[in-house]
Image: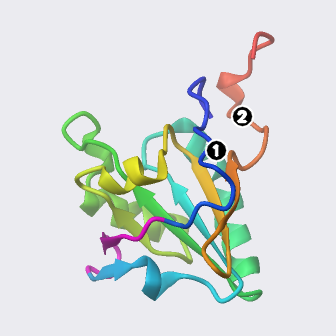
Amino acid sequence: MARTPSNMLDLGTKAPSFNLLDTVSGNMLSLEQLKGNKGTVVMFICNHCPFVIHVNPKITELAKVYREKGIQFIAISSNDIEKYPQDAPELMKVKANQEGYPFPYLYDETQEVAKSYDAACTPDFYLFDSNLSLVYRGQLDDSRPRKWHSPYW
């Protein structure tokens, strides 16, 4: 992730509910409809972020593996499309298809969902247990896109 650190919701926090447009199917989907039997990963991602682009193959792979284990992945983009037109819903659908996302890619137009999760950057990850209680929040791993490597961070 960039130098913007993840905010840290308290562990045990219940996953905030949402009902958002799935840019792939065109349907409105809720957390209750999507949650996994054993756990749920909510990811705040977007199309243009080099840090998201860097982890796209890994999150796609993980989502495929863990779906079979009862863990549901959910991606949400909350970016302002006036500032970041490449993150518009129609381009989110294209990206999801190109990447082969095995999870819904939801659009948070008002940014209210991102605010309710206290999401600060992309990618930001939240892992909830089967009761939708937060058990992890933060980054996927310590890897960075090659051009972002620096001895200073």
Proximity of marks 2 and 1: CB atoms separated by less than 8 Å: yes
The reply, left or right, for residue 85 in relation to residue 139 is left
x, y percentage for residue 39?
68, 78
Label drawn at residue 86? none
| Residue depicted at x 64% and y 67% | 60
x, y percentage for residue 48?
43, 42
| Residue depicted at x 71% and y 84% | 38
The residue tagged with tag 1: helix, strand or loop? helix
Q: Main secondary structure of the magenta part?
A: loop
Query: Label 1 sits on what residue type?
Result: His
Total marks shown come to 2
Q: Is residue 23 magenta?
A: yes
Quadrant of the drawing holding the N terminus = top right
Q: Is residue 5 above or below residue 34?
A: above
The region drawn magenta spans 16-26
| Residue depicted at x 60% and y 37% | 6
- Mark 2 lies on residue: 144
Q: Is residue 67 above or below residue 129?
A: below
Which comes before the other along the chain, label 2 or label 1?
Answer: 1
Residue situated in front as seen by the camera: 131 or 52: 131
Splitting the image into 4 quarters, where does residue 135 fall? bottom right
- Mark 1 lies on residue: 54
Q: Residue furthest left?
A: 82
Structural distance between the alpha carbons of marks 2 and 1: 7 Å
The reply, left or right, for residue 7 in relation to residue 108 is right
Quadrant of the drawing holding the C terminus = top right
x, y percentage for residue 21?
28, 72
